[in-house]
Image: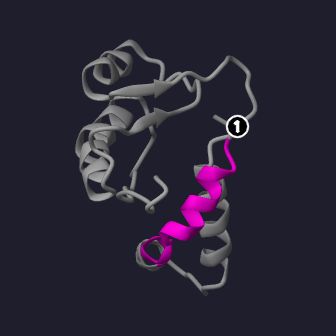
Amino acid sequence: MAISGVGNLDFIDGTMNKYVYLDIRERNLKQSARNLGISRHFKLYQDNDPKHSADICKLWVLYHCPVVIKTPAESPDINPIEHVWDYLQQKINEHNISNKQELRKHLIEEWAKINGSFCAKLMKSMSN
């Protein structure tokens, strides 16, 4: 996400591991940064999840991300995307969803409605 909005939404079937995480990054991070108009100066923020800090993922970041925001060990989760997930959950709860296809459809619809002003408010709430 950026002040201008959210990037690509991706769906995971099965268990997330470092290889799935890396695949998502490879398919979406740069494309999302381009679409958000931040491709030359984006900052990657992630927590210390073992998938994020796996050697293969660290190496990929080294070559593909201009800046990485370091997260101290056991720090509170201050990533503004957490507020986007909460908002998305609230929106999804408004629908009567009975299967996986409906869930996916509504997630895509609600994700597309998340606007830049909402994201900007969240991003500006972070300290430098």
- Residue carrying label 1: 77
Secondary structure, magenta segment, majority class: helix
Q: Position of residue 57 (x, y in %)?
A: 36, 22
Q: Considering the image in quadrants, where does the C terminus appear?
A: top right
10 Å crowding of disc 1: few (<14), some (14-19), many (20+): few
At 55% across and 61% down in the image, what residue appears? 119
Residue furthest out toward the top: 55
At horizontal 53% and vertical 22% (from top left) the residue drawn is 50
Where is residue 73 drawn, in percent x and y?
A: 68, 17
Q: Quadrant of residue 9?
A: bottom left
Magenta highlight range: 110-126
Q: Is residue 119 above or below residue 15?
A: below
Instruction: Work out whether 80 lies above or below 118.
Output: above
Q: Is residue 67 left or right of residue 123?
A: left
Where 93 falls versus 25 (above or below)? below
Mark 1 lies on a secondary structure that is loop
**With 25 as the anchor, is 114 left or right in this view?**
right
Nearest the viewer among 69 and 95 is: 69
Left or right for 98, reference 8: right
Q: Is residue 119 magenta?
A: yes
Residue nearer the viewer, 53 or 114: 114
Residue at 58% from the left image edge and 24% from the top image edge: 48
